[in-house]
Amino acid sequence: MEETKMLKRGMDGFQIKVLALVLMLLDHIHYFFGFTGKVPLLFSQLGRLAGPLFMFIVVEGFIHTSNRKNYFKRIYLLSVLMGAVNYGIMCFGLVRGDGFFPMNNVFATFALVMVFLQGIDWIKSKDYLRGVTALALPVVLNIVFYLLPPTWMSWFYVLEFIALPLPMFVEGGVFFVITGVLLYLLRSNRKLQVGVFAAFTLLWPCIMGLIMRGSLSLPFMILENYEWMGAFAAIFMLAYNGKRGRNAKRLFYVFYPTHVYLLYILSFMVYSVM
């Protein structure tokens, strides 16, 4: 009975989503205006919690939605739209004076993760052909990309950038894709799910740091390689009470691309007058 009361007092999906939106906004303020030297790094460090929290909500949505096909379609089409806009900004010379242009498109990451999750479910239901195809095809295509002749690679890159999300190229990369899969596989045991997520999020940057630098230092891990701070999202995942909360599914769909392009336009203007 006491555990039930605690769950009811926890955070619902809407509240976690709003928290993630605020943290994401802080992160992107630093991302777009870091060149000014006026935005504290803390904004981006706090923002490390946003991605895992959104992934957690997407996995919950995938589990509980009444229509997975429509859920995937919405996110995938938005990813294509943002990919096209980002590519257009690059191609039509709307790049900031320092060469910066927005590459944000977490919709593509979520769409790719949902392909993997559906593949897992197909295998569980013994639909092995579709399941193995869903799990293997993105990986194989990613490998093929690196084997293509240079003359083909540029065309494949355009396709990948806009409409074909692959593990090595989506926002957050392989790390974020694995995070989504782990959250889904361990969903039946919240404490185990969150514990494994936290351990993975802490260890991955350390391993990558060792591979890239050969050694780790506290300043490097705090000032540069601070993806591990996303492990603190575990606190809010544990607080999730299993309820959806307010029905505001369009909030993220509208807010995410709108704030990205508004911040970019503002940063473009600020850079132009500096």
Image: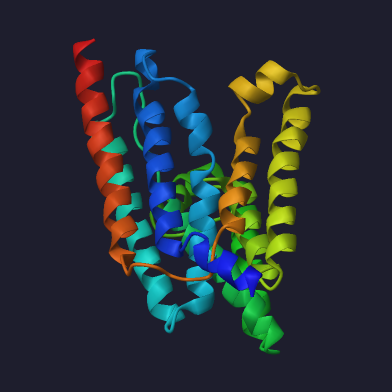
Q: Residue at x 34, y 56 (%)?
A: 252
- Whole-percent x, y for residue 111 in the image: 47, 63
Left or right of 139, for residue 274: left
Q: Which of the two residues, 71 or 234, is positioned nearer the viewer here?
A: 234
Query: How many callouts does the rendering have?
Result: 0
Q: Quadrant of the N terminus?
A: bottom right
Q: Is residue 171 above or below residue 270?
A: below
- Compared to 214, does 232 lie above or below? below
Quarter occupied by residue 37: top left
Is residue 122 shown above or below 106? below
Determine which quarter of the picture holds residue 226.
top right
User: Based on the displayed image, in which of its 4 quarters is residue 6 positioned?
Assistant: bottom right
Question: Is residue 84 something one can see in this rendering?
Answer: no
* Residue found at x 77% / y 22%: 216
Q: How are the residues colored?
A: rainbow
Residue situated furthest top in the rendering: 274
254 or 242, which is in the foreground? 242
> In the rendered view, does 10 fall on the left or right side of 215?
left
Q: Quadrant of the C terminus?
A: top left
> Horizontal and vertical percent for residue 73?
38, 72
Q: Residue at x 48, y 55 (%)?
A: 54
Task: Give the side of residue 230 with respect to residue 95, left or right.
Answer: right
Q: Nearer the viewer, residue 79 or 17?
A: 17
**Residue 190 image position (x, y, % from top left):** 68, 65
Residue 199 in sight in this render: yes
Q: Single out the residue that lies furthest toward the bottom.
A: 126
Kindly identify the residue that appears in the image at 22 percent across and 32 percent down. Answer: 265
Residue 256 picture location, percent across and down: 33, 49
